[in-house]
Amino acid sequence: MIKLKTITVDKLLFKKRLSMIEQFTIKDILFKWVGGPTEGLDDFLPLEYTESVFAKMEAKQVTTFLINGDEHFRYATITEDNQIVIGVLDSNKELTHRIISLDEVLVEKHL
């Protein structure tokens, strides 16, 4: 099981806009992180780019993607320090932010 570092949102500075390259990078990292599903990320975890409050690749409303059993994936984004961060709703419906490390993407390749 992957252990993601949990951080408080006040410690993060999110980008206001993501370039197309950054959007594709997020999708590529998520694809590798979930183990490269054969159906492709767009079918497995459809994402849409939004800029409300900050720029992010957000899960579409109909998507239910669970992390660590009981956390619902909501979005992925990049900070001003170029960290990949995911937002998840925990079992109490509270939004938590987690940093995805490159080690988790390259070594674990699964949830």
Image (cartoon, helix red, strand yellow):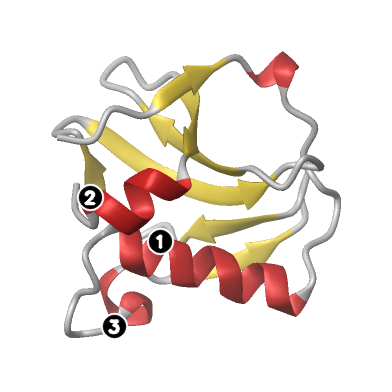
In percent of the image, x 80 and y 32: which residue is there? 13
Figure quadrant of the N terminus? top left
> In the image, is 82 to the left or to the right of 69?
right
Give the answer, above or below, for where 1 lies relative to 43.
above
Q: Secondary structure at mark 2?
A: helix
- Between disc 3 and disc 2, the foreground one is 2
Q: Secondary structure at mark 1?
A: helix
Provide residue 6's location: percent of width, then percent of height: 46, 19
Provide residue 107's location: percent of width, then percent of height: 27, 52
Q: Quadrant of residue 94?
A: top left
Provide residue 56's location: percent of width, then percent of height: 65, 54
Give the answer, above or below, for where 66 lies relative to 30.
above
Q: Quadrant of residue 58?
A: bottom right
- Alpha-carbon span between mark 3 and mark 1: 11 Å
The residue carrying mark 2 is: 108
Give the answer, above or below, for where 50 lies relative to 27.
above
The residue carrying mark 3 is: 40
- First reached walking from the N terminus: tag 3 or tag 1: 1
Q: Secondary structure at mark 3?
A: loop
- Residue 101 vs residue 51, the one in the foreground: 101
